[in-house]
Amino acid sequence: MQGHTNAYMLMYRKIGLPTVNVNIGEIPDYISEILDKEEKEEAIHFQLMKERESKMKVKIFYGDRIKVIETSRASTYEQLLEEVMKAFELTDKKENCRLRSYNVPNKIMMDTYTGKEKVILEELGVYPLKSLALEIKKDEDTFSEYDPNLIQIKINVWRTGINSLDEFSLNPIRIFVKKFAKLEELIEILEKTMGVSKEFILYFILTLRVGKKSSGGGSYYIEVLSTLEKAEKTLAHLKVNEGINLFVEDTRIKHPIAKDYNKSLGEEKCKWEIVSFILCIRNMN
């Protein structure tokens, strides 16, 4: 016959105990010293944690130079500007320098902090690793305020010798235009920029359509914008957005190898399309 054992745990909680008051004089000196030491260490640790949490790094762009600067969330815009000027070793007048929010991919200076010089960074939305640009003007110049309705468009004008479509090689002209402007307004800007009558300007969006990964190739799709039916449409409708690359050419100038290229495909092609075709062939080889 087997026996069975059951185990029980009983827990008791005492309540209503009177508070015991201890006079400081009754506490042994060595215990007081231990408590004081622990209290000071805890205060130092708390202060270090507080300082560590309040610190952050921001990324500053100035021309082709970039610096990561450590500052405090509680610092004001004015204090950060002083730190930036010191980091870049600038001797310009403080009133001729300012920081702006920066769109890194499109290299566009955006919001300014005018009138908020005494506001702390945390309230300005300057968070850790926030990208800011340093802007400097001359004494006789005036800072312009950011217009959120303006977009930057990169204009790539065809020229001989182009062998790459990366931005560094293309070196586009950057222009600003209202995002809801009509295409014909952009055409007028192009006429002035290129010094060419609009009847000789061909402009379009060039998009790379990547092919299969195994082949490593791809093809360029061209969307021509210079058509009469599109002239009255807005840039927003045509999806001409912030930072887009527009490819432009003077139709009177012929590509050096246009004859051979057109002969092989049997139709007239624009010069940028010839460039893109050559690059695609080169990438596949």
Image (cartoon, rainbow, N blue to C red):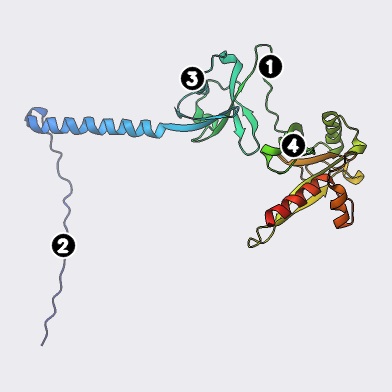
Residue 216, position in %: x, y?
A: 65, 58
Distance from the alpha carbon under mark 3 to that under mark 4 = 33 Å
Q: Circles 3 and 4: CB distance less than 8 Å?
A: no
Question: In the image, which disc is placed on residue 142?
Answer: 1
Distance from the alpha carbon under mark 1 to that under mark 4 = 24 Å
- 10 Å neighbourhood of mark 3: few (<14), some, or many (≥20)? few
Name the one closer to the observer, 256 or 31: 256
Q: Circles 1 and 2: CB distance less than 8 Å?
A: no
Type of the residue with mark 2 = Leu
Type of the residue with mark 3 = Lys
Furthest residue in direction bottom, as rendered = 1
Residue 29, position in %: x, y?
A: 8, 29
Comparing marks 2 and 3, which lies closer to the viewer? 3
- 10 Å neighbourhood of mark 2: few (<14), some, or many (≥20)? few
Residue at mark 2: 10
Distance from the alpha carbon under mark 3 to that under mark 1 = 23 Å
Comparing marks 1 and 2, which lies closer to the viewer? 1
Type of the residue with mark 4 = Ile
Residue at mark 4: 153
Label 1 or label 4, whichever comes before in sequence order: 1
Question: In the image, which disc is placed on residue 86?
Answer: 3
* 122 to 218, vertically: above or below: above
Label 3 or label 4, whichever comes before in sequence order: 3
- Point out the image quarter for the N terminus: bottom left
Q: Image quarter for residue 249?
A: top right
Type of the residue with mark 1 = Thr
Label 2 or label 4, whichever comes before in sequence order: 2
